[in-house]
Image (tube, grey):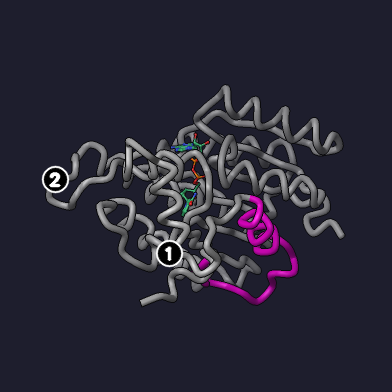
Amino acid sequence: MEKLKNKVILITGAAMGLGFASALVAAKNGALLSLVDYNAESLEKAKNEIESKYPETQIITAVADVSDEESVKKYVQETVATFGRIDGFYNNAGIEGRQAPLVDYDLDVFKKVVDINLMGVYYGLKYVIPVMQKQEFGRIVNVASVGGIRGVMNQTPYVATKHAVSGITKNAALEYGKFGIMTNAIAPGAILTPMVAEAFRQVNPADPQAAEDNYAQANPTKRLGRPEEVGNLVVFLLSEDCSYVNGQVIAIDGGQSNAY
Ligand code: NAD
């Protein structure tokens, strides 16, 4: 069954990783797609790949930086101008920053992580929610992280901003549930995407594969997650079936965040 048949789904950070994987699963489920990313070349590639797999899918793209409020306003307006509505918003774009101890953290990188992971998520909500309020329907999935519910060594701004995403999610759920808008966040563990591959290169530059194997061993499932597994959860949370789950931060990490 196509869970997102004719639903308009807006995805940020759609060119790669979790955004792209979810766009593919959404297309498989019949969605109309508005894809946003600041990497123009990869975004075009992503669009072509989705179209070659699911030729029926209508797709528009916007090259935009989610940390720039005017660009966010524009990608929301363009989506509404083309499709007339926004049913689901996958507020996904984010960066890790560099890994360093708290007191040594480079301030410019710190501020960039805040601009993208916190302000970018907020701007998206600020412009998408009014569209959904008018429709009296909407589904929002913000992307936190296990770093949004736990600490992660050497990733202070990442952890701070992802905890903020968990908090914003709860407030959006409280304030806009009455308009039929369900807002939730996902908290992925290590899912093998370009971002996580880069993190393993930073942990062990000489042998990133060893860092990956080591990390997988600590997981109850003894493996990392796959992007399409996240896509399946996101599609449920963006669908009409998600009608009474609101304000939750849902871990998708093979159970690892339960360990003490
Ligand atoms: P990724 O780096 O593989 O892909 C991120 C995509 O977002 C890229 O296409 C990039 O160009 C785009 N992007 C980044 N900043 C942007 C900006 N300012 N404006 C527009 N586009 C931007 O990363 P990923 O692993 O797919 O991560 C996606 C989201 O999931 C992030 O919010 C990340 O923090 C979160 N997350 C990922 C994991 C994981 O294991 N992969 C775990 C927890 C949380």
The numbered disc on residue 218 is 1
**Is residue 185 something one can see in this rendering?**
no
Residue 209, x across and y down, in percent: 44, 43
**Is residue 124 something one can see in this rendering?**
yes
In the image, is 41 to the left or to the right of 195?
Answer: right
Residue 238, x across and y down, in percent: 67, 59
Residue 41, x across and y down, in percent: 57, 22
Residue 167, x across and y down, in percent: 40, 66
Kind of element beneath mark 1: loop
Picture quadrant of residue 59: top right
What residue sits 64% from the left and 45% below the top? 21
The answer to whether the residue bearing label 1 lies less than 8 angstroms from the nearest atom of ligand 1 is: no
**Residue receiving disc 2:** 104
Picture quadrant of residue 136: bottom right
> For the residue marked with disc 1, what is the amino acid?
Ala
Q: Nearer the viewer, residue 139 or 161?
A: 161
What residue sits 58% from the left and 27% below the top? 42
Q: Are marks 2 and 1 in contact (CB under 8 Å)?
A: no
Queried whether the magenta region covers residue 43, the answer comes back as no
Question: Which span of residues is magenta-colored?
Answer: 228-251
> For the residue marked with disc 2, what is the amino acid?
Asp
Calculate the distance from the C-alpha at mark 2 to the C-alpha at mark 1: 27 Å
Kind of element beneath mark 2: helix
The answer to whether the residue bearing label 2 lies less than 8 angstroms from the nearest atom of ligand 1 is: no
Quarter in which the C terminus is drawn: bottom left
- The earlier-in-sequence mark between 2 and 1 is 2
Queried whether the magenta region covers residue 239, the answer comes back as yes
Of marks 2 and 1, the one in the foreground: 1
